[in-house]
Amino acid sequence: MNMHQLSVRHITVTVRAVTATALIYTTTLGAQSLDGTPLSAAIEPHRHNTSHSATNSATNSATNSTTNNAVNSTDHIQASNAKNNVKNNVTSGTKNSVANRMVNSVASNEAQNVVANNVVANNEANNVAKDVAKDVVQHSTHHNRGTVLYHNATVIHPATEQKITDGWLLVQNGNIVAHGQQRPAQPLPAADRYEDLQDQFVMPGLIDVHLHLTAGPFRVEMVNGAPTMTLKGDAEITKYHAISSLAYGITTAFSPAGEPQANAAYAKAQQQGQWLGPELFYAGYVFDPTPIVGGSVYPSDPAQWQAEIARQKAQGVRAIKLYGGLTADEVAHGIAAAKAAGLQTIAHLDQVSWQFAADQGIDMLTHALPTSAELLSGKARSAYQALRQNPANQRFIYQWFAYVDYDSQAMQQLFKTLAKQQTRLDLTLHVNELFYFARELEQRYPDSQMWSFHPQSRKSWRGLMAAPSYDWKAEDFRLAQQQMPKVLELFKRLYDAGVPLAIGTDLNTSGPFYLRELELTKAAGLTNWQVLTLATQGGARHIGLTDRGQLTLGSRADFIVLQQDPTIDLQALTQISTVVQAGQAHQVSALRAALTP
Ligand SMILES: [Zn+2]
């Protein structure tokens, strides 16, 4: 947005790196004006060395206005969501009473056998019967107040590869307080309310570990007469993407980069029930020399590093994001400084190798682009280094795969180190695919199917994905596309080595990209069960959450209801009927209706 404020159509900027909604390279900007005119783009193949002071002050004011917007728009959202009767079940959850509730639930279950059985044994049981049953329950005991029993579903447990037919889940205060299987001669547990899922399938809510939910679309604006890259968020766009991601079954997300204030504002509003969307955990600005308003910071000395890390920590970040433009020394310093502040680190690296970062104790690595020459050997390494002489040449994003030998000592050592240290990875395989097929995105992702994007982002995202390949010929695309199996093999090698992996999309909305990432994960050689485990338990592990990702006793009631069985066909994820988040049920049709102006 704000593209119309640009006083020029064509601007030339030096971009050492590109965006948090995608990967960052020195390249042509694919951004577009509102009327679709490309904001063109020449390349200057040298490092950007603009002073950061102007950027910093711009960042601060941008941040303030974004935060205010987020706060102001809360009222509108509250009003528009009133019909959904959004409740905040999160804060009322009490871990220590799970056992008590279990006991109570079982006890009252015994007491109400007859009533509950009568209600449930007959699937035709109408609301009147249920109301009567509820009445009896409420009058005879108060132990089960607020419980909802989801029943008549096949409950899928990806992590244990179990499928429970005629399964049920008892939910209270946003948590699962009991679960089991309905047997012919036995009654269902008593509950205040019964939700007959009509033979559908239930699985844990999906987790997107790479969702830049609050980042604005990447764009260029004129600031004080100079073209300036910006990722400033916009509350209305964030609100849209949050709802559309939830509608795709994403109940929890991690944003590995974004304005810390905007992320904090979203997380708070979401937890208070004022915003609908995935529960968000996040990192803050990326640490990188490339100035991006609302996107990056680049401290110049250890005291500045410490101060910036402290500022981000105060905004609730879980990790510090280190970026591809940092030197090895800076990466090492960032890891140590974050650790000293009690924070984790996540890195998107390029020339600094994954091995180096792992040796320094990095916690997370992102993107299937371990594009350091240090991981190559012999002639391959020198050929690759020659290619990297020209920083404007982005062909390395596929050439590295042509050169790498996964059986080499360097790569074997890397797999071993990452497994030993349990470094968490999200490879965003589909981003490689988007880059390698950048000229085919309109056919692959037609606008008509892109309702998950806010109308203002619906067109611009493709330009972003086409940025690295601005000067590629047909032959380059052919060679790039040929590397896709090798990209998938990287995933499989890491998986087989025991490296913890998770599923991420790297966009502002999970949308169809999440399912594409699952399909590519399957194409890498995993079973549907394994893929679904990474999408749920793997995501929770990636973020460091133990209360979700599985439908077990005491875990959060985050689950999705599907018409088809996703363990048979992942495409079942395109037919989610209901998303339950912290015990709050949302019909996907209602979520989608909320996106229609
Ligand atoms: Zn990203």
Image: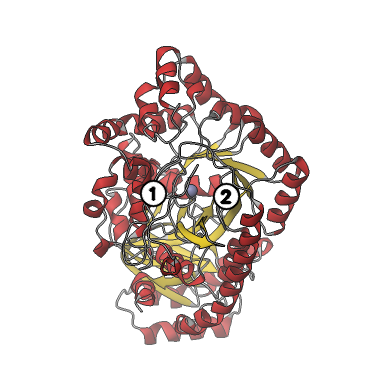
- Circle 1 sits in a helix, a strand or a loop, which is it? loop
Residue tagged 1: 41
What's the mark number on residue 15?
none
Q: Residues within 10 Å of mark 1 (few under 14, many from 20)?
A: some
Indicate yes or no: mark 2 CB to ligand 1 under 8 Å. Answer: no
Who's the residue at 38% across and 67% down the image?
Answer: 454
x, y percent for residue 240: 43, 69
What's the mark number on residue 291?
2
Who's the residue at 47% across and 80% down the image?
Answer: 81
State how the image is colored: secondary structure
Q: Type of residue at label 1?
A: Ala
Is residue 560 visible in the rendered image? The answer is: yes
- Circle 2 sits in a helix, a strand or a loop, which is it? loop
Q: Type of residue at label 2?
A: Pro
Locate residue 248: give its quadrant: bottom left
**Quarter placement of the C terminus:** bottom left
Decide if residue 278 is on the left or right side of residue 589.
right
Residue furthest right in the image: 303
User: Looking at the image, is mark 1 or mark 2 earlier in the sequence?
Assistant: 1
